[in-house]
Amino acid sequence: PARASSTLEGGRRMQTLGQVQTAITGWTLDSYWSSCSGSAFSDVGNGEYRMHKAACAKADGFKVSVSVPIPVNAVSVGLEVQYASKCGGWCAPLWVTVYHKNVSQNRNVRWCFDMQGWTSNCNFRESLVTSQWHARTFDISAYENKFGPVDTSDLLLELVVYGDGQTQTTHVRDVHFTQWVTTAMTT
């Protein structure tokens, strides 16, 4: 966390108190390409979610995708991820994507884990050891670095398990936003 500081905004002295972490809830399931029978996003309790992509034809769905709005003043997204196996060909156990809610989803920043097949839509790639929990932090400013300034409340966070014609199960937990907190100071 950063040290507390103060600035002048609109004639009022504002104090930056530091950073706080907020658990993410209220996920929205994308049903367009996530319609494969047996695929699911489920809350298994204690802040852990199971994302399961069942084996099915591409026309029936090739991913399990959930999204949530990014709050004002968010600076990063943190989570822990685990999957039992790496997939083979045209798949990824996890994509973490930030995109603008009012612009094409193709205008995004994406982190891909153990991506197989084409990787051109991944800005960052990483391979993880299976069957272990891995803590990762994703800097939201990567979107601004690529596309320019934006109000973070106009952005969405998307988590995807991608598997074209195959099964993949990924667990995520402790998913949270880190935000700057400011307050008006009394004089």
Image (cartoon, helix red, strand yellow):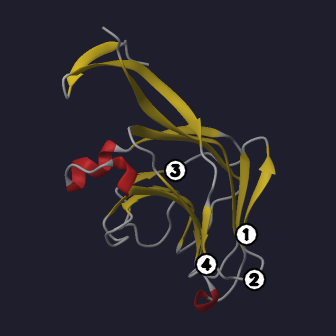
| Residue, disc 4 | 31
Lower sequence index among marks 4 and 1: 4
Q: As drawn, which residue projects farthest toward the front?
A: 187
Lower sequence index among marks 2 and 3: 2
**Other-residue count near label 1 (Cα within 10 Å), few / some / many at <14 / 14–19 / ≥20:** some
Distance from disc 2 to disc 3, alpha carbons, whole Å, reads 28 Å
| Residue, disc 2 | 37
Residue 16, how many percent across, how many down? 35, 20
Q: Nearer the viewer, mark 4 or mark 1?
A: 4
Q: Which mark is residue 118?
A: none
Point out the image quarter for the N terminus: top left
Looking at the picture, which amino acid does disc 2 mark? Answer: Ser
Lower sequence index among marks 3 and 1: 1
Q: Which image quadrant is residue 14 in?
A: top left
Q: Nearer the viewer, mark 4 or mark 3?
A: 4
**Other-residue count near label 2 (Cα within 10 Å), few / some / many at <14 / 14–19 / ≥20:** few
Q: Which image quadrant is residue 141 in?
A: top left
Point out the image quarter for the C terminus: top left
Distance from disc 2 to disc 4, alpha carbons, whole Å, reads 11 Å
Q: Which residue: 63% across, 60% down?
A: 86
| Residue, disc 1 | 40
Looking at the picture, which amino acid does disc 1 mark? Answer: Ala
